[in-house]
Image: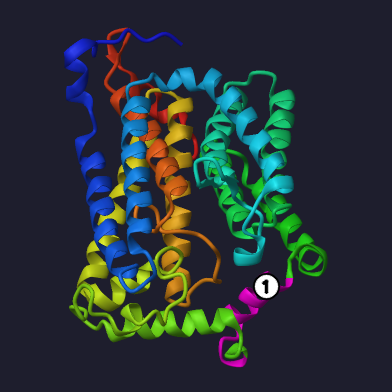
Amino acid sequence: MYFVEKIKGKNYLKFFDLPLFAAVLALTIIGMIVLGSAVRAMENPQYYISRQTAGIIIGIIAALVIAFIDYGDLRTLGIFFYIGCAALLVAVLFIGTGEQEWGSRSWIYFSFIRLSIQPSEFAKIAFIILSSMFLERISEGMDIKFNILKLTVYSGLVIFLIMMQPDLGTAMVFIFIFIVLVFVSGIKYRYIAAAFLSFAAFSPLAWLFVLKDHQKQRILTFLFPASASASDEAFQLIRSIMAIGSGQIFGKGLFRGIQTQNNRVPVKESDFIYTVIGEELGFAGSILILAIIFFILLKCIYIARTAADRYGSYLAAGVAALYGFHFTENIGMCLGLLPITGIPLPFISYGATAMITNYMALGIVMSVSMRRNMTFFGGKAGQLQNSSVKGF
């Protein structure tokens, strides 16, 4: 497929998706303010602020660079990126850190620069890029069986390596992205039903032989919170709900949260940062955050629907799935609506690696968005290809 670009040089900027970028930037600014409140009573708060600021700066630069790269080039670049991420996921099994603090070896610490990275975060981007490429080939009838096999192997390898850390929460992100992409590609419902039945059949074995004790406890806490009140997970959940509920309509005000400022909510700077929003900004602040999140997700879905080709559609849909799962799971667990996992809130939770990869994902979506206005042999590319994306 060949496109004749009409957006070269200085005119390229007029196709820049400013509303989407502004929404993400607004969420990031609010996140920095909330993070400042969350770490205020903690030891060395400047450490968190400086690391997060560095992650934001690097992330924004990465997003802008990726946005101006033709997303079609990611077919080639993504393969090398995937290989690098897979190598890091293997390395983290041997030299990874974090098992004592978080229950999984998910980080690689570079002592000479005093910096930790989480390879699974970068692997999410590689996973979306590569899965989109194989699904595009399958959708266009290119050696279907062989590409299905490659899709299964490449996807399964990453998920397996993450399960070995073990990091069930992150593995669920990959599985959800895969399900969304397969659905968007237009796979027949009988295959989806077969996969669901297989998952249901595998669940008892996973409970007995795959899940660790702390992972089982999180699920039990979600299902039976009253009977699990003595566990650490139940303590987190109870404190989280208490903090959010105490915020009422307009909150207690920044830096004035009783639970937050007295360090009564564990991991409030990352996994449970939404409790800070609920307690200090109240229902009004929480709704504002949800409105921005809703806009970002809708924009990603719209871009996926109007992309110039299937590959662009799958890329945008994969990023929408990534953001959607993180937003839903993080907020849901803070409210007691979903099991507790170590899933951060995008653009708000502390974590430089996650911040960078979230902005990289944004850059991919913006690259797809900017190229929806190419001329395709006299017509709009997005309009011509829109109907070919079956899942939409």
Q: How many marks?
A: 1
Kind of residue at badge 1: His
Quarter of the image that includes the C terminus: top left
Where does the magenta region start and end?
Answer: 213-227
Residue 342 painted magenta: no
Q: Is residue 392 visible?
A: no
Task: Where is residue 20? Give x, y as percent.
Answer: 26, 41
Magenta: predominant secondary structure element?
A: helix
**Position of 340 relative to 89 (above/below):** below
The residue where tag 1 is placed is: 214
Name the residue located 45 percent from the left edge and 48 percent from the top edge.
Answer: 354
50 and 278: which is toward the camera: 50
Residue 216 part of the magenta-drawn span: yes
Residue 256 percent across, percent down from the top left? 23, 79
User: Measuring 70% from the left and 46% from the top, which residue is drawn there?
Assistant: 95
**Few, some or many residues within 10 Å of mark 1 (<14, 14–19, 20+):** some
Q: Is residue 101 left or right of residue 58?
A: right
